[in-house]
Amino acid sequence: MPGIGTWLGRVKEGAAALGERRAQAVARRDTEAAAERLRAAEARRARPRNPDPGLMVPWGVRVAAEAGWRFLVLAAALWVVMRVIGSVRLVVLAFAASLLITALLEPTVSRLHRAGLSRGLATAFTAICGFLVLGLVGWFVVWQVLDNVGNLSGRLQEGIEELKRWLLESPFHVTEQQINDVAESLSNAIGTSTSEITSTGLQGVTVLVEVLTGMLLAMFSTLFLLYDGKRIWQWTLKLVPAGARPDVADAGPPAWQTLTAYVRGTLIVAFIDALFIGLGIYFLGVPLAVPIGVVIFLASFVPLVGAVASGALAVVVALVTQGVFTALMALLVVLVVQQIEGHVLQPFILGRAVRVHPLAVVLSVATGGVVAGIGGAVVAVPLVAVANTVVGHLRAHAGDEDEAVEPAPPAAGAAPADGPAAPGQDPG
């Protein structure tokens, strides 16, 4: 049966080929599965098990956080400084006043010293002359007030009666009964506030003692600053870290020049304001023109606010003593002088030595007044002007250093050395 044998052989050969193909398919499937498991294992090994949380935070949030904690540190430091200043406000204000007076008198001391006088003698002569002038001005103001107080009282009564008649005849429809009611209310308020007035008087005595103490402290500080200012500055530099000491030392002369220019310019502007406003109200017949001029001179050291307040004082005195028309003329004089000050005197006299924006002036005066009263309002603007000069000088100096040590640009394809690229920056 050769046919049957041949057929069985073919069946066996087909079964063997089928088993071989099946074995090859299983082996290929096992190889692919093993390769897939190997790739998955390598991917798991390549992926970090615990990624850095900082890298998971968006770049903008990281920048905001860095700026935020630095801002909190600065705010805390500023709060501590303000608390310390509030605790020793009298000492700080006295020293600030001595700095302003020193900036005004120091050029005279230097000239006398170059002329051949010793430093101590030049300091003593300048300080005595300066304090003598201040004392004479104060005595003159008090003398004028006391000499004219009787006349002013009579004129005040006449002015009140004239103001009352004007209100009755004005189109505001004010009746005499309403005016009498207001006067009675004021009288009752004054009568029921006797204890408060007494308490205020006692507080006034305390304030007077503090003012005298501050004046004496300012005088002694001014003497020492005039005589030994350079050595005091050198000692102050030792408190600065050694790395920042050269920059602070370089910023000192520009800051002192700014302070000197501010004091001189403000003194000249205040004198011109007081002179012309005082002459204007004098020719209008307003009483106490000279004391009002001195008040305008002193108030002009508080920028913007002082000029407005002192001008309002002149207008009120003119209204009460001379009537509405004279008050309007006094207001016109004040407005003209202040416009000349703002558009001519300030830019011409101060120039570019004191570059402070008017908004910064208003905010600094308000902050100084809240922290330390009138004295704080006086020293706030020169402090801001000096700080602006110092910051600008340090920024310019830091810019020069950055240009001097600017690194070479990285080669093409090189990764940045300081972390991932910022938004908008080519990562290379």
Image (cartoon, rainbow, N blue to C red):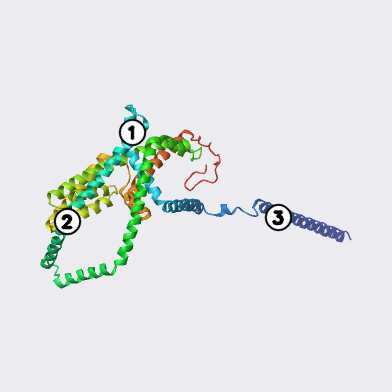
Q: Which residue is mark 2?
A: 150
Identify the mark nearer the N-term, 3 or 1: 3
The disc labelled 3 sits on which kind of residue?
Arg
Give me the disc on residue 37. 3
Discs 3, 1 touching: Cβ within 8 Å: no
> Residue 31 appears at what percent x and percent y?
73, 53
Element carrying mark 2: helix
The disc labelled 1 sits on which kind of residue?
Val
Residue ID at (32%, 65%)? 196
In front of the other: 259 or 58: 259
In front of the other: 7 or 313: 313
In front of the other: 130 or 173: 130
Identify the mark nearer the N-term, 3 or 2: 3
Identify the mark nearer the N-term, 1 or 2: 1
Q: Which residue is mark 1?
A: 109
> Residue 285 appears at what percent x and percent y?
12, 52
Element carrying mark 3: helix
Mark toward the viewer: 3 or 1: 1
* Residue at the top extreme, as displayed: 116
The disc labelled 2 sits on which kind of residue?
Gly
Can you tell which quarter of the image residue 354 is in? top left
Estimate the spatial distance between the alpha carbons at disc 3 and disc 2, rounded to whole Å.
110 Å
Can you tell which quarter of the image residue 259 is in? top left
